[in-house]
Image: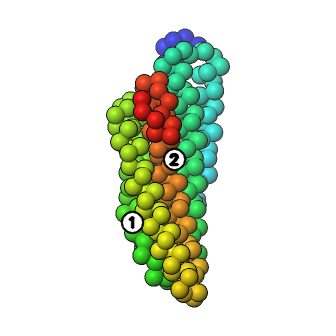
């Protein structure tokens, strides 16, 4: 593989990963919209497109492995490909979280509503924006932008704890709405996982751009 073809391959890899990121982000947005509106038909769109995200993951992995095998890249190019492989896995899991949320929404439609005080809309907005900003940081190779994603992870974690406490209270005081409260708790838990995956992506961007391992929020 010539250097020109190699760099074209890197560009293709980046574009495929960004396309997959858009699909995963859309899946979460749809699942959250279904939660907010109670429109189960939107859940079906999330379930339908899961296979497309899985197929995109395989395509990205295959291209990344080909680039590693054929060129034996060094330094920043090697870090870029490694980061792409790791980001690819996180994006596939973001799609999985969207499917999980959609399944909980379908279950919610079949049970009496609980009185859980859960600001799912705000939590979802934070998590989705973290994914979007992490992907923007990847697109622009902006490590500083990636750092801002890391700083927001605690906000989502705090919201998840608050919703857990609210759901626990609701389940303790009303057995009739127990299932609805549990599903709401699981929706929040999946959104918290979306934010975790966004954090992982941001960490991988920093690794690629700066060669620094900032997992567990160490300082670069």
At 59% from the left edge and 22% from the top edge, which residue is drawn? 67
Answer above or below: position of 171 versus 214: below
First reached walking from the N terminus: tag 1 or tag 2: 1
Q: Is residue 23 left or right of residue 64?
A: left
Q: CA distance from mark 1 to mark 2?
A: 19 Å
At 39% from the left edge and 38% from the top edge, which residue is drawn? 146
Does residue 26 appear in this view? no
Q: Nearer the viewer, residue 160 or 51?
A: 160
Q: Which residue is mark 1?
A: 121
Answer above or below: position of 130 versus 183: above
**Quarter where residue 176 is shown:** bottom right
Q: Position of residue 142 (x, y in %)?
A: 36, 32
Q: Position of residue 202 (x, y in %)?
A: 44, 39
- Considering the image in quadrants, where does the C terminus appear? top left
Task: Say whether marks 1 and 2 touch (CB < 8 Å).
Answer: no
At 37% from the left edge and 63% from the top edge, which residue is drawn? 122
Q: Which residue is mark 2?
A: 197
* Mark 2, other Cα within 10 Å: few <14 / some 14–19 / many ≥20: many
The mark tally for this picture is 2
Answer above or below: position of 184 versus 95: below
Residue 69: give its label. Answer: none
């Amino acid at each position: 593989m010539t250097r020109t073809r190699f760099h074209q391959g890197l560009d293709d890899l980046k574009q495929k990963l960004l396309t997959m990121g858009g699909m995963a982000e859309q899946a979460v947005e749809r699942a959250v919209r279904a939660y907010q509106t109670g429109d189960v038909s939107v859940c079906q769109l999330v379930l339908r497109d899961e296979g497309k995200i899985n197929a995109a993951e395989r395509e990205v992995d295959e291209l990344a492995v080909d680039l590693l095998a054929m060129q034996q890249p060094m330094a920043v190019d090697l870090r870029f490909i490694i980061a792409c492989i790791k980001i690819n896995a996180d994006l596939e899991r973001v799609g999985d979280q969207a499917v999980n949320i959609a399944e909980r929404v379908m279950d919610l439609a079949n049970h009496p509503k609980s009185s859980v005080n859960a600001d799912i809309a705000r939590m979802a907005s934070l998590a989705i924006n973290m994914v979007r900003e992490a992907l923007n940081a990847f697109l622009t190779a902006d490590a500083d932008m990636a750092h801002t994603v890391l700083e927001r992870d605690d906000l989502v974690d705090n919201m998840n704890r608050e919703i857990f406490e609210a759901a626990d209270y609701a389940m303790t005081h009303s057995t009739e709405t127990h299932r609805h409260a549990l599903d709401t708790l699981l929706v929040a838990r999946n959104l918290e996982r979306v934010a975790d995956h966004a954090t992982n992506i941001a960490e991988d961007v920093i690794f690629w751009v700066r060669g620094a391992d900032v997992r567990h929020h160490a300082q670069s």
